[in-house]
Amino acid sequence: MKPSSEANDVRRIFRPRRRFPITDYSYQTFSLDRSHGGPIGNSRPSFLNISREYFGYEARRNFLAESAFFLANHSFLESSRRLRLTRLENMDMTKAVRFAPASIAFCLLLSCRPAVDRTLEEMIDHSYPVEPTATLSVTNRDGSIRVYAAGAETRDVRVEAIKKAYRADRLKAISVQISAGPNSISIETIYPSDSGAGFADRSGTVDYVIIIPQTIRISKLELANGEVQLDGMRSNEARAQLGNGRLFAHNCFGNLDLNLKTGNLAIVYEWWEDIEFSIHATIQDGNAFAYIPAEAAFHLIAHTATGKIANDFAEKEQRHAEPTNTVDMLVAGGGKTTFEFEAQDGNVKITGHNP
């Protein structure tokens, strides 16, 4: 049952923004080598935070520190060699030795200073009136797409797009093209073509936050690198395709078709409603995780070619059995819902919780 405290007011979504990676979308998978299905306990549900903050350029600072150390050390050794060859009597070797550590420490101190964030931003914020059964399509290359469903009375789509780049001309060259009508809205992200040079500036991301009627049809959410999130969807069709990153569906009681090439996929429910809908998820290289209330009734279909499946809803005698890669079972009689997971190279974990 849906908590009565949940409000349809979506103003909370436009809170102060956290910074997201501008080029780094590297994700690691988890392992089920030591995992198995276990009894459903009374543990409180955890909330998945899919947004990652990026506080600085650690790699660059480490590189500067190592470079400073190398240069200082090399300079000291070269000076020592020359001193021995020329036998300069006026140079005190002890002072040179004492000076080298101080130089190294000074360089390290300078290199560890906080990096200056030179990221430039530009925000686009518009609302478009649409019918509750309109169609939405979004394409993007790098960044994020987060779609939040509002209440049934909502009659418009609000689009917030944040462009980011390191140079003003690069930022201006990134274009967000929106075509909107009462029955459809299309959002396309255009990036400047790369010059092909080895050190050319390829920076540039666009982060979308889109508020829509909960019954709107999503024909396409397409992102090459980054994060995709669907929240509160109740439509007959919603399709999302992600190349590399994380794909997250939260409290969606509508039909979802999710496709992920590389990364991790998570489906989370904080409460359960016994209504008819289906979730179909395909992962080529990565893992799938589902967090479902213990009271739920559904048909579970899962298969992984090279990984393992851990299932809290398995029968008691099967929970500690040998790892399996195929599951086809009715949970609590099957209900009206179907979850289907297909992983080519990765693991699937189905966890039950008590809301």
Image (spheres, grey):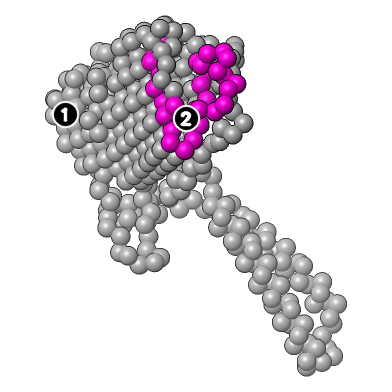
Q: Quadrant of the N terminus?
A: top left
Q: Position of residue 318 (x, y in %)?
A: 55, 18
- Report the amino acid beneath label 1: Ser
Residue in the picture at 27% in, 13% down? 152
Q: CA distance from mark 2 to mark 1?
A: 41 Å
* Residue 57 visible in rendering: yes
Residue 297 lies in quadrant: top left
Give the extent of the magenta segment: 297-326
Q: Position of residue 138 (x, y in %)?
A: 25, 36
Residue in the picture at 35% in, 39% down? 242
Element type where label 2 sits in the image: loop
Residue nearest the viewer, comparing 347 with 274: 347
Q: Which residue is mark 1?
A: 184
In the image as oriented, which residue stretches furthest toward the bottom? 86
Residue in the picture at 52% in, 13% down? 315
* Residue 161 visible in rendering: no
- Above or below: residue 245 compared with residue 102: above
Count of residue discs: 2
Residue 9 lies in quadrant: top left
- Above or below: residue 262 compared with residue 39: below
Element type where label 1 sits in the image: strand
Residue 325, numbered circle: 2
Dot 1: few (<14), some (14–19), or many (≥20) neighbours within 10 Å?
some
Q: Position of residue 119 (x, y in %)?
A: 43, 50
- Report the amino acid beneath label 2: Asn
Residue nearest the viewer, comparing 194 with 125: 194
